[in-house]
Image (cartoon, coloured by chain):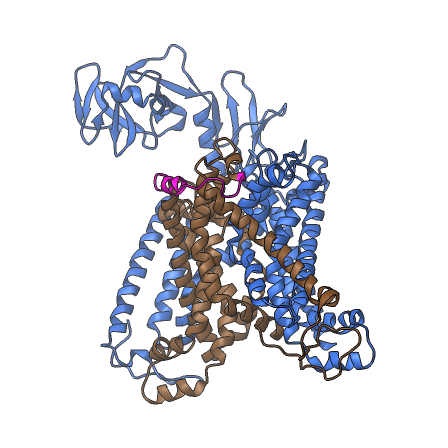
Chain colours: A brown, B blue
Amino acid sequence: MSVLTKAAPRESAPREDRYTIRHDAGPRGVRWWAEVGWRHVVGIVMVVICVVPLLYVISASLNPSGTFTGSNRLFGEVGWNNYAELFESRYWRWFLNSFVVAVTSAAGTVLMGGAAAYAFSRFRFSGRRGALTTLLLVQMFPQMLAVVAIFLVLLTIGDVIPILGTNSTLALIAVYLGGALGVNTFLMYGFFNTVPREIDEAAKIDGASHAQIFWTIILRLVSPILAVVGLLSFIATFGEFIIAKTVLQSPDRLTLAVGLYQWASDERNAPWGLFSAGAVLAAIPVVVLFLLLQKYIVGGLTAGSVKG
Amino acid sequence: MTDVSLASPPRADGKRGSDSHARRTGPGWYVKIVLMAAVNALGLYGVWTAVVVGSWGVAVFLALAVAAADWVYFSRRMLPAKYLYPGLVLLLAFQLFVMLYTAYVAFTNYGDGHNSTKADAVAAISAQNERRVEGSETFPLTVVERDGELGFAILRDGEVAVGDATAPLAPASGSDDGTQVTGVDGWTTLEFAELISRSAEITELRVPFSDDPAAGGLRTQDGSLGFVAAPVLVYDAAADTFTNTNTGVTYTPNDHGSFVSADGDQLTPGWRVGVGLENFTAIFTEDRLAGPFLQVLVWTFVFAGLSVITTFALGLFLAMVFNDPRVKGRKIYRSLLILPYAFPAFLATLVWRGMLNEKFGWVNEVLLGGAQIPWLTDPWLAKVSVLAVNLWLGFPYMFLVTTGALQSLPGDVLESARVDGASRWRAIRSITLPLLMVSTAPLLISAFAFNFNNFALIYMLTGGGPHFEGAPVLVGHTDILISMVYSVAFDSGVKQYGLASAVSLLIFVIVGLISWLGFRRTRTLEEL
């Protein structure tokens, strides 16, 4: 991140240039403000804008009155009763639902995507190019565009196998996994291709089967991309809203995104303190994961883009 | 199952002939056998239930899926398919098939009132339009229960008969006191207290009197006295018409899946039929729908476009501001500036919804000293708020991306520009920006596509509101196409899956076009 790519120009230009690195002491006084100081002003203003809503929600979660108006004085009063009240609500049920859905989907995505990437990367078979092109095309159309059809299909399936119908966690996971291959195979396929084929050849000569090569050699070598795909998929599923809202109906089955939406949009009872406490707790795992993964996420974004 | 002693057959490509089944005793083999047994058992169970229910599509799909699984995993040849199968089955069912199904539904009138087949509609119309036959016999009736399902038991010709909502009255063994049934084998008789507590269910219950639908149904008002309600509307299968036995009016099926009388009176429910392009013509030509739809369409493009432009501009500006090594504490700034990106977007949107609340929100109350600005309920302000919140959510991503791109720009080009006497602005415009566009253009296109379908933001922040008045569906000034789809399908009172799917199909076409243009555009940019 902090690597500087600009070599310092030797001459010192009369008009300061932002690519210049000065080896002597920096500018002072008015010139310092004109060249560097204003950047701090911009930075501080932006940091305030970024941080205030987050401070606000933390403050609201600690506000004992739990109302909108009470929450407006940042950290005016501090108490833990909103967090305590979460235990009497459905919150932890939703948390568990979200966690189960996100972890299962992430694991399924990694396994299925990894297997598919292995097949595309290591085997040459008829229809391979066609399948890759199809995946590339499918990737362009997010699953949620078909949300109405997904609902209707689940209604039909539900007549036959209720556990895979609407209002079922398992059905929601199945739907998410249906969209997994299109999104992640390409990312993984590129990474699998960077593992030298000589490694599998050597293993094969030693008598390893294709399954052994996959499970014990390749999967270990590509573990970084598995971790990234798994965690990205976890974060995406954790926050997915439209399909979860369509598929799940009974209050005990909801995921956090749907449940917290109901709290926040409940104009009559306005359980704002409860919502804020729930939001803070729900955000913690995602923020932690994100900060851990930051360099992979950013690196992956730009690397993918340059390759087109 | 294949024979253990068979030698591995020669392979077409001659290279990858090694076979996992060479060592049949390994733990993996047992895992596979157990898994395949489970898949077959569950799959066949599913096929069987689907056939029983009469759901032929599900039955065929499951049968094919199970057959394909067996073929793939017990054959020695299908090596790549062994790795692709699980993902492909789910992809087929929940991505490709649902896309095709969207296209199909878009050309039907599927929705409330047209949910099912014609046979179901005929049965429903017969059952719903029943009246007690004047002066008909009453039966002392006993309410019974089995597995939570209620049923009625009566004495018919001196014999105990029992039935429930789905099974017509049929003779059963039980006891009676001469006038009323006192118990039926396999059923429990409801106590008085239960009769009271479940009275709503009991008065709703209709037990078919016999296999013949025209015989009517057994109903009760009080849980102790039953009567036969006969259909007022009688279906004549040969003529395919309904006739009202009281008035003599005849209802004939029309091509929109409903029975209608000569003077336009329509029976509900109807059934699902193809309506051709009608959903699309409604979207574009029907007065009350076309106006709101066009506004939504335009706003979708404006919203997605402005979202990309504003986030990119702010992100790039900040990246340039902090790309100066003389600024101390850049690392701290950067890690604080990406906080909005790290915080889950759906939570941040909901927090903003609260902060922008007109009466009690933090922005009005504290920041603006008690002003009552309708941030989310005024048509124009709501649009501004949606864009502003999306800017807050989205600029850190652009900041990260452009920072990375700026740092990997070749320094020599800029240096030579400066040697040639280019001004700072000129260098940015002619060198930095074009070079940046090469690496960020694909990201901008995917950001556009993402915002084009940014359902969660719109739905959570404004719910699409403020709503257009007089529109036949619940859409509003900040609705984008995908939130319109959701609203038409689920939120507008009458569920219109056909119309919603038609809008979905339009989004598919637009997204496809954008991606295609995007790919072409990036190629031209790279050739520069």
Residue located 70% across and 64% down the image = B517
Range drawn in magenta? A72-89
Q: Is residue B351 magenta?
A: no
Residue located 80% across and 82% down the image = B419
Q: Is residue A225 visible?
A: yes
Position in image of residue A106 (x %, y %)? 42, 61
Left or right of B163? Residue A280 is: right
Position in image of residue A131 (x %, y %)? 52, 70
Position in image of residue B199 (x %, y %)? 33, 21
Q: Residue furthest right?
A: B421
Residue B154 vertical position relative to residue A272 in the rendered view, above or below: above
Residue A43 vertical position relative to residue B225 in the rendered view, above or below: below
Quarter where residue B109 is shown: top right
Position in image of residue A130 (x %, y %)? 55, 71
Q: Residue furthest top?
A: B135
Quarter where residue B200 is shown: top left
Residue A41 vertical position relative to residue A156 in the rendered view, above or below: below
